[in-house]
C-alpha cells in the first residue's frame, strides 16, 4: 500500500512540476522612462517602448532572444508561473517597468541580499480579463542610489542586456471586472505573497467613484491594528486579502482598490464593480388578442427596473406557421409605427421604458404573432414576449335587422300569449258556482 502511495505522490509532483513550468519565457514590452527638464524648467517623462523577454531559469542561462533585453528570473522563492497556471503564453500580456522607491532604501530581508536594489514591476494580464498579476523584480546592486529622485538618473539598460532578478512580492486578482445584480453577495478577489517570513505588510481597501474616495479596510501586521471590515484576518495571514460585499446596492458601484505595502514597495490593483440589473418585461395584453376588423387597440411592451440605462425594445410580426421552418422561413418584419415613452426613474435608481403602438385590426393579420424583444447588456439573449392576433369579421346590418325583427316578434307573441292566459283564467273564475 505504501509503495502505491509513493508512486501516486511522485506522479502528482511530476504533474505539478510540468504544470508550473509550462511557461519558460514570455515576450514582454519594457516601458522605459527618460526623465528630463523641459525648456520651462518642468519635469517631463518620455516613455520608451522596448522589446524584452521575461525568462525563467537559472543564473547564467543563455537568453532565448539574444536581440532583446532579458529579465532573467532565477533563484526565486516566489514563482510567478504559479499564478498563471493553465494559461498559454499567447493568452498573456506582459508589461515591465522600472519602479522608483521615492528615496526609501532599505535592505531587503532575505539571505544574501545586498544593501541596495534596483526594482522593476512586471504585470501579467489575461487577454480576456480573467486575472491580473503584478510582481516586483529585485536586482541587487552594489552601488548606492542617487537620492530621492532616483528616476532622474536611472542606470542605462542596453538593448541586449541580461538583468538577473528575483521575485520579491506578488499580488493577484481573479476579478479585475465584476458584474453584480442588486442585492447579491460579492467577493472581490485579492491575494498576495512575499518572499520572506514575517514581513511588515500593510493591506488596505479603498472604494472610489466619480472623484470620491473612501477607505474600507486597513490592517498593519507590525502593530496588529485593524480598521474597517470586509476582510477576514485569518485569511489575511495566509495572503488572502479578498474583500466581501454582503449586499450590493446601487451605491456599491465603483472601483475597489486592493493595495499591499512592504517597505519600500507599494502595489495596488483596481477591481471595477458594475451594477447590472436585468429588465422585467410584460405586455398589456394576454397571449391571445381578439378584435373585430377595423378595431383599434393600444399594445404596450414595458421593460421595468433595469440598470444601466441603455435598453433596446423592438416589435416585430411573423406568421407562426412559417416561423418553424428550418429553411426558407421569412424573417420577422420589424414594426415601424412603434413609439417610445420617456425613461422612468425608479426609486431604487433603476429605469423603466415602454414601447407601444396602435394596432389596426385587419383580417390579413389574423393568426399572426406579434413579438416584443428586449435587449440589455445584463442579458445573454433578449427577452421575448408574444401574443397571437385573432381578427373577426364585423356583423352586417342585415343580420342585425333580422335578429332585431325576430326578437320583437317573439316579444309580441309572448305578450299576446300572456294576455290570453290571463283572460282565460279570469273567465274561469267567474263561471264557478257558489
Image (tube, helix red, strand yellow):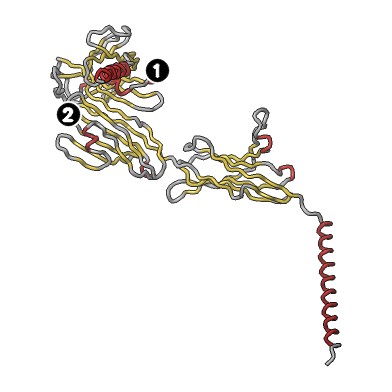
Q: Is residue 316 above or below residue 3?
A: below
Give the residue at mark 2. 199
Using a 10 Å C-alpha cutoff, classify the residue at mark 2 as few (fewer than 14 neighbours), some (14 to 19) or many (20 or more).
some
- In this figure, which residue is indicated by the disc labeled 1? 90
- Mark 2 falls on what kind of element? loop
User: How far from the left and from the top, in percent, is residue 200?
Assistant: 16, 31
Q: Residues within 10 Å of mark 1 (few under 14, many from 20)?
A: few
* Figure quadrant of the N terminus: top left
User: Where residue 142 sits in the image (x, y, percent)?
Assistant: 14, 15
Image point 18% across, 28% down: which residue? 263
Q: Residue at x 29, y 35 (%)?
A: 242
Measured as percent of width and height from the top left, residue 131 is found at 35, 27
The quadrant holding residue 185 is: top left
Q: Which mark is residue 401?
A: none
The image quadrant of residue 58 is top left
Judge whether 120 appears above or below 275 on screen. Answer: above
Query: Would you say 222 lies left or right of 180 here?
Result: left
Residue 35 visible in the picture: no
Q: Is residue 402 left or right of residue 135?
A: right
Sequence-wise first label, 2 or 1:
1
For the question of whether residue 94 can be seen, the reply is: yes
Percent x, y for residue 137? 24, 20
Reply above or below: 253 against 260.
Answer: below
Left or right of 399 in this view: 277? left
Q: SS at mark 1?
A: helix
Amino acid at each position: 500500500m505504501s509503495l502505491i502511495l509513493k508512486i501516486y505522490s511522485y506522479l502528482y509532483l511530476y504533474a505539478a512540476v510540468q504544470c508550473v513550468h509550462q511557461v519558460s519565457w514570455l515576450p514582454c514590452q519594457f516601458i522605459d522612462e527618460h526623465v528630463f527638464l523641459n525648456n520651462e524648467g518642468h519635469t517631463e517623462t518620455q516613455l520608451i517602448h522596448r522589446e524584452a523577454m521575461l525568462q525563467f531559469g537559472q543564473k547564467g542561462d543563455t537568453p532565448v532572444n539574444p536581440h532583446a533585453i532579458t529579465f532573467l528570473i532565477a533563484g526565486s522563492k516566489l514563482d510567478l508561473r504559479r499564478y498563471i497556471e493553465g494559461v498559454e503564453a499567447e493568452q498573456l500580456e506582459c508589461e515591465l517597468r522600472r519602479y522608483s522607491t521615492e528615496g526609501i532604501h532599505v535592505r531587503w530581508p532575505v539571505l544574501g541580499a545586498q544593501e541596495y536594489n534596483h526594482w522593476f514591476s512586471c504585470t501579467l494580464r489575461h487577454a480576456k480579463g480573467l486575472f491580473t498579476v503584478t510582481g516586483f523584480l529585485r536586482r541587487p546592486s552594489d552601488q548606492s542610489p542617487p537620492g530621492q529622485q532616483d528616476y532622474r538618473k536611472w542606470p542605462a539598460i542596453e538593448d541586449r542586456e541580461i538583468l538577473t532578478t528575483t521575485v520579491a512580492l506578488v499580488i493577484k486578482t481573479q476579478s479585475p471586472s465584476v458584474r453584480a445584480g442588486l442585492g447579491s453577495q460579492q467577493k472581490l478577489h485579492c491575494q498576495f505573497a512575499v518572499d520572506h517570513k514575517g514581513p511588515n505588510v500593510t493591506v488596505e481597501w479603498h472604494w472610489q467613484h466619480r472623484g470620491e474616495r473612501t477607505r474600507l479596510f486597513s490592517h498593519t501586521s507590525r502593530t496588529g491594528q485593524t480598521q474597517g471590515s470586509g476582510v477576514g484576518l485569518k485569511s489575511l495571514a495566509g495572503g488572502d486579502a479578498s474583500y466581501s460585499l454582503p449586499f450590493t446596492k446601487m451605491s456599491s458601484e465603483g472601483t475597489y482598490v486592493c493595495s499591499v505595502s512592504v517597505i519600500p514597495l507599494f502595489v495596488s490593483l483596481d477591481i471595477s464593480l458594475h451594477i447590472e440589473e436585468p429588465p422585467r418585461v410584460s405586455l398589456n395584453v394576454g397571449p391571445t388578442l381578439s378584435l373585430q376588423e377595423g378595431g383599434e387597440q393600444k399594445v404596450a411592451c414595458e421593460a421595468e427596473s433595469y440598470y444601466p440605462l441603455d435598453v433596446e425594445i423592438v416589435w416585430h410580426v411573423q406568421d407562426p406557421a412559417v416561423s418553424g421552418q428550418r429553411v426558407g422561413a421569412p424573417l420577422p418584419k420589424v414594426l415601424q409605427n412603434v413609439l417610445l415613452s420617456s425613461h422612468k426613474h425608479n426609486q431604487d435608481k433603476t429605469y423603466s421604458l415602454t414601447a407601444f403602438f396602435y394596432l389596426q385590426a385587419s383580417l390579413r393579420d389574423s393568426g399572426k404573432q406579434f413579438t416584443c424583444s428586449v435587449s440589455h447588456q445584463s442579458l445573454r439573449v433578449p427577452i421575448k414576449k408574444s401574443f397571437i392576433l385573432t381578427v373577426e369579421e364585423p356583423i352586417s346590418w342585415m343580420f342585425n335587422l333580422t335578429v332585431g325583427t325576430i326578437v320583437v316578434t317573439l316579444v309580441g307573441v309572448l305578450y299576446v300569449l300572456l294576455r290570453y292566459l290571463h283572460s282565460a283564467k279570469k273567465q274561469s273564475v267567474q263561471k264557478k258556482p257558489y
